[in-house]
Amino acid sequence: MSSKKLYIETYGCQMNFSDSEVVASILSSDGYSLTADIKEADVIFVNTCSIRDNAERRVRNRIQEFKSLKSRKPGLKVGILGCMAERLSDTLLKEETFVDIVAGPDAYRDLPSLIEESITDGRQMANTVLSLEETYADINPVRLDKNGISAFISIMRGCDNYCAYCVVPFTRGHERSREPKSILNEAKDLLDKGYKEITLLGQNVNSYSFKEGDHSVNFALLLQKVAGLSPELRIRFSTSHPKDISDELIETIASTNNICNSIHLPVQSGSTTTLSRMKRSYTREWYLNRINKIKSLIPDCGLSTDIIAGYCGETDEEHQETLSLMKEVGYDYAFMFKYSERPDTLAARKYPDDVPEDIKGRRLQEIIQLQQESSHKNNRNDIGKTFRVLVDNVSKRSDKQMSGRTDQNKVIVFDRKDCTLGDYINVKCTSCTAATLLGEIV
Ligand code: 5AD
Ligand code: SF4
């Protein structure tokens, strides 16, 4: 018996990958099975990202290929999901006439009926209603990861921070936290299936808060509850906002063995005046104070960040402050971007995008160069140390080598000997590049 086939392609952040697993679950309850072969598909979904203009352009180009697939297979349905669906539904329906379905991040339960109606009516269907409650708490995601070792759990949706440059609050709506019980059940289920690592996801996980009777569960408490399920389960989380990284949370990470010593703390800029134009609600000093607290309580903590180069009105001095902050923190890793103006955001309405493209490019290059040096320096400091590593991959270069990640979230490559995927092993670091550690099992 042949079931209807669904093909999903996902762009953007980890949250989108996690949402695609929810979508896969909703459609499998509706009789669909997943396929990795697009030519076999009866329905193609693209889960999209709007964070920067180039992310949107990539998807607009990619979906033209679905148009030609559709001309060869008339019954094929094409749906655009996620942030671009939310932000550009009218444009997509008008300009991409081959698109059948447009569904925003809070409308995924409606997908089976959107498909059904599109089949029976032959009309384009859209649902971009944002919700104050939807967390998909009762949906058991179909895991789309390949290795069965590491999985994501979304613990909240949306964002209320309205950073001036950011489109997320407009595309993903208001912040809402998911009930702890449903998060714990999902984590238990993963543990039973043999998963070893769980990453708790949200736009701003450290503002997680759920009222239970007369008390509320905050992020530090939730972390403890998930970590308490098993010492064999590693817990990570992403992303944190510097304004909410409390002493209590840092102490919880420090005192709980299986909460990984790795914090992703997006700084965006090292200049207080730029941060104020970004509406980030903290200063350079506040941020450095948080970093110092982390370093004093968790001396071996892995630190990573996000940085935007060439934000509106950024002067050369302000850019230099970003470089000096990077030197002071000494990040292990950074995601670095050129500022991209997003329609309707506060920055687009209030501040001209006035840093010339060549200067943006030069500043970004300086930031990347400095980060490369910092990563390499930190990696060199790891030589001689022994790490507990969760083996999660066969090395790309040779199947005689495996790779895994340290507690600090660094990739380390080593000769496989007799270890297998999913093992915890001790690996001594013997050398490194700027991007990876190399080592041997001890
Ligand atoms: N331009 C460039 N980078 C952006 N980010 C968010 N919005 C923009 C934008 N308009 C970056 C921030 C954020 C990361 C997910 O993407 O650094 O932390
Ligand atoms: Fe965007 Fe700021 Fe919310 Fe992050 S915290 S998603 S940067 S608005």
Image (cartoon, rainbow, N blue to C red):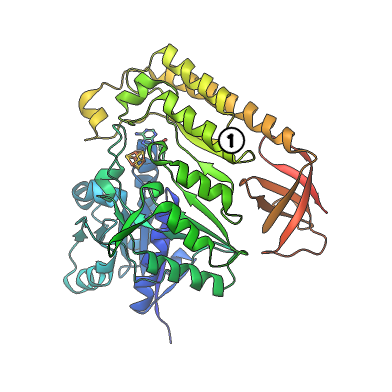
Determine whether 316 is above or below 128 in the image. above
Name the kind of residue labelled 1 in the image: Ser
Please state which of residues 19 and 217 is positioned toward the viewer in this rendering.
217
Q: Secondary structure at mark 1?
A: helix
Task: Looking at the picture, tell me which residue is in the foreground, 311 or 205.
Answer: 205
Q: Residue furthest bottom?
A: 1
Percent across and percent down for residue 14 are 45, 52
The residue identified by callout 1 is 296
Query: In the figure, is residue 408 to the left or right of 355?
Result: right
Q: Nearer the viewer, residue 398 or 192?
A: 192
Rendered-image quadrant of the C terminus: bottom right
Q: Position of residue 163 (x, y in %)?
A: 30, 35
Mark 1 nearby-residue class (10 Å; few <14, some 14–19, many ≥20): few
User: Is residue 425 found left or right of 367 in the rendered image?
Assistant: right
Q: Is residue 309 depicted above or below 79 in this figure?
A: above
Q: Quadrant of ligand 2?
A: top left
Q: Position of residue 376 (x, y in %)?
A: 68, 31
Quarter of the view holding residue 258: bottom right
Name the residue located 64 percent from the left edge and 45 percent from the top edge: 410
* Residue occupying image coordinates x 31% and y 49%: 83
The total number of labels drawn is: 1
Quadrant of the rendered image containing residue 378: top right
Residue 10 seen anywhere in this rendered image of the structure: no
Residue in the image at 56% along x and 74% along y? 193
Q: Residue at x 83, y 60 (%)?
A: 417
